[in-house]
Amino acid sequence: MDISPIFLGIIVMLSWGTADVLTALFTRKSTIFSAFLYTQLGMVLLYAAIAFWIAPLPAFSLETLVLLLIAGALSTLGYLAFCKAMQLGPVSVASAIIGCTPIITVLLTIAFLGERITPLQTGGIALAILGAVLTSLKFDEIIKLSFSRMEKAAMYGFVAFVSWGIFYALIDKLTSSIGWLYPLFLAKVVSVAMFGAYLAFDGAVVTTIRIPLSLWAVALGVIVLEFVGHVSYGFGVSVEQTAIINPISFSYPIVAVGLAHAMFKERLEKTQYLGIGMTLTGIVLLAM
């Protein structure tokens, strides 16, 4: 099936951007542990429901198993740091840093996995990343914040940025050996297993994963949107265009900011309008 990685990247951007708003809402009414458990376990169950129907379980080499373990650990670290950054806020600080994730992924895939992009596409990638960062930043909010609060949000955002940057480069590597579906699926399985082991050793955390009934609809929304985004991303990587689909996918802050503007009447700054325009221009250049 011939589907443009640009189109798939836009699906990922829309899914993850919407999920971002719901995740921020979820973590601020529960805990990062409950957000991790329900969203990641939910995605694993959805993957399991379709995996063996779409493709048989592939054979694994020792290298593949090691890479899956590393990818699972990075996924766990990145998602917990992401949830903590969303919980602490401001989202604008954390999202701006996390939006730079493609810098690491694109550099790794070009340097080590042999992907090639044109000069025009390079310009599109740069515009998309810079646009995502500008869209995330709200300078009037940042000015009002204490340095310690900004420092914490930035710290957790940086951990997610580095973890996910390497994680998505590993997913590209794994896709070439075990197909497009299983790298993300099995990395999530490893991630949930690691978290389950942590719960077994720290019983006190179990009390933090209960959520009120009112949050189940939010949790389900995050699960479905994250799943759609991850499946679309995995399929897009299978056509060996990580250097293109990754920057588009991580332009999702423009969706999150747009939704916050529409739903909560948040005022957009001039720099955010500029960021949205730069991101959209970057996507157009990537399609050329």
Image (spheres, rainbow, N blue to C red):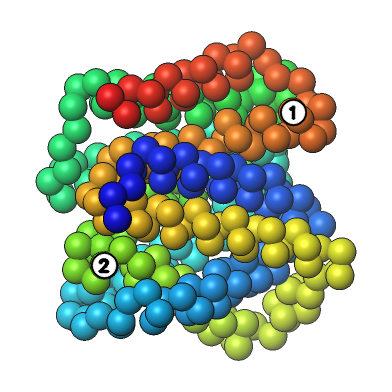
Residue carrying label 1:
261
- Please indicate whether residue 16 sits to the left or right of residue 241 in the image: right
Q: Secondary structure at mark 1?
A: helix
For the residue marked with disc 1, what is the amino acid?
His
What residue lies at 82% left-to-right and 57% top-to-bottom? 29
Q: Give residue 75's quadrant in the image.
A: bottom left
Q: Nearer the viewer, residue 52 or 39?
A: 52
Residue 111 picture location, percent across and down: 16, 43
Which residue type carries mark 2?
Gly
Residue sitting at x 62%, y 82%: 199
| Between 107 and 230, the one nearer to me in the picture | 230
Work out whether 61 lies above or below 116: below
Query: Residue 145's image quarter?
Result: top right
Q: Residue furthest bottom?
A: 200
Residue 142, horizontal then vertical, whole percent: 68, 25
Q: Quadrant of the N terminus?
A: bottom left
* Residue 216 x/y as whole percent: 78, 67
Residue 179 tag number = 2
Direction left: furthest residue: 114
Q: Residues within 10 Å of mark 2 (few under 14, many from 20)?
A: some
Residue at x 15% of width, y 37% of height = 116
- Asked whether the viewer can see residue 126, the reply is no
Above or below, comparing residue 260 to residue 141 in the picture: below
